[in-house]
Image: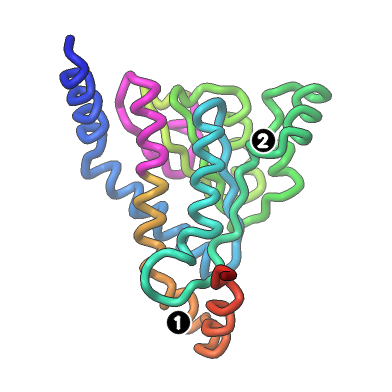
Amino acid sequence: MSFEKVASQYLRSVFEAFNSKTYKAIEQLANDLLECWISGSAVYICGNGGSAANAVHIANDLIYGIGACSSTSRVPGLDVEAITSNTGILSCLGNDTGYENVFSLQLDVKGKPGDILLVLSGSGNSANVVKALEKAKVIGMKSYAILGFTGGKCLELADIPIHFKINDMQVAEDTQLIVGHICMQWLSNQKEIVYQGDNSRSRDEVDGLEMQYRPKK
């Protein structure tokens, strides 16, 4: 099979993974992220392997990108953390308590009712993300899970699953970033709602934040 054919089939698989059901769930995620931005609630993201790396990427987009992109004022983004990123914490919890607890025990300390947990998982069966979703339910957090394959255990545990019925791990990981980037681009156009709505900061404060976050020359 030629390279061009492999590439075309791959890209077609990514495109065809999306449908009206996934669009609706992504829109719900975007709106809940907007609510967190307005209220100041936190967002926690977790996953394993490539999904762990995607969690860091999406966190970067939400903490900075949504407030910096677009032609309007530059303002702070969401309170978001990829709980996959601190190797000291991960190795400590994994060594002392078992790798299945590396996310749920972080949520024990950080999570609060009204926060959001976003799980990224191809199979939906990794013990640590399953336990994270269970912990989120106990705390009173709202949970989302971006899943591939059959969705696994996470399909039933997540409050809102975003399920791509694909049997390809690379495509599954691509869908995670695409969902993150869709939300980022939409949120970057909602800054006036966050900072000028009924619960917003004043125009003077927004202008001050723009100056504060303007890159230094």
Q: Which residues are magenta?
A: 153-178
Q: Residue at x 57, y 37 (%)?
A: 46
- State yes or no: residue 14 in magenta: no
Residue 103's disc number: 2
Q: Is residue 34 left or right of residue 129?
A: left
Q: Residue at x 76, y 47 (%)?
A: 109
Q: Amino acid at mark 2?
A: Phe
Screen quadrant of the N terminus: top left
- Which residue lies under the disc numbered 1? 197
Residue at the right extreme, as displayed: 96
Q: Nearer the viewer, residue 118 or 48?
A: 48
Task: Where is residue 121? Give x, y as percent.
Answer: 48, 29
Q: State yes or no: residue 154 in magenta.
A: yes
How far across and down, in percent of the image, does residue 211 sit? 56, 79
Q: Residue furthest front?
A: 217
Could you say which quadrant of the image residue 95 lies in?
top right
Along the viewing direction, whichever of 206 and 200 lies nearer the viewer: 206
